[in-house]
Image (tube, rainbow, N blue to C red):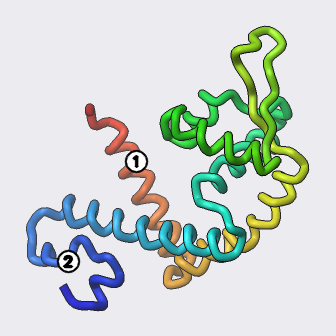
Amino acid sequence: MSLANERAGDREQGHENSQHLQLRAWLRLLTCANLVERRVRANLRESFDITLPRFDVLSQLARAQSQGNDDGLTMGELSQRMMVSAGNVTGLVEGLVADRLIVRVAQAKDRRSARVKLTPKGLRAFEAMLGPHESWIDAAFAGLDEGDLKRLLTLLAKLKISAAGVQP
């Protein structure tokens, strides 16, 4: 693997002549996702001193709020939206509560269950990150024109349907 390919994280390197197109496509997709994620993680850390998972929690809570859910989300709803285990969410929530970016609100009907929602400070912090976050994503996709992006979205939608139909 060349140094340039190693830096780019080309996992599909060495499979160019392979007839295994599905494997090559999967490796290319994984490489691209990892490159964009690595850039976003570094930028969030450098610009806002926050991790990507913590940003994701704030994002999900902001989305719920913008959809009229002012009561916040349960831990289960949050973990479903983030596609991670409830255990992973618990640690993230603890840290964000300690930083006063989110609050836990006990349920009147079930004191064992709580909902989490953004504080005004958390909403301001998240809104401050939105513009830069979007510009980082835009920069990662700068090599694609509008037609390319539409074709990519169409193909990814087909892949999503195909992958969703595969039994574990």
Q: Quadrant of residue 77?
A: top right
Dot 2: element: loop
Residue 152, horizontal then vertical, whole percent: 45, 66
Q: Residue furthest top?
A: 109
Disc 2, disc 1: CB below 8 Å?
no
Residue at point 79%, 38% (across, down): 117
Q: Residues within 10 Å of mark 2 (few under 14, many from 20)?
A: some
Q: Residues within 10 Å of mark 1 (few under 14, many from 20)?
A: few
Image position of 38 with respect to 166: above or below? below
Residue at the far right: name it.
120
Where residue 156 sits in the image (x, y, percent)? 42, 57
Above/below status of 47 relative to 163: below
Q: Please give left or right for residue 29 compared with residue 24 in the image.
A: right
User: Does residue 3 lie above or below 90 as drawn?
Assistant: below
Q: Name the image quarter holding residue 138.
A: bottom right
Along the viewing direction, whichever of 75 and 20 lies nearer the viewer: 75
Amino acid type, callout 2: Gln
The reply, left or right, for residue 68 in relation to residue 29 is: right
Residue located 43% across and 65% down the image: 33
Where's residue 115, x and y in %? 75, 28
Instruction: Name the kind of residue labelled 1 in the image.
Output: Lys
Foreground residue among 166 and 64:
64
Residue at the disc numbered 2: 13
Is 93 drawn above or below residue 36 in the view shown? above
Mark 2 and mark 1 lie on one chain; the one further toward the N terminus is 2
Q: Secondary structure at mark 1?
A: helix
Quadrant (top left/top right/bottom left/bottom right) for the C terminus: top left
- Name the mark nearer the viewer: 2 or 1: 2
Quadrant of the image containing the N terminus? bottom left
Q: Which mark is residue 160?
A: 1
Residue 25 in the image: x percent, y percent?
Answer: 27, 64
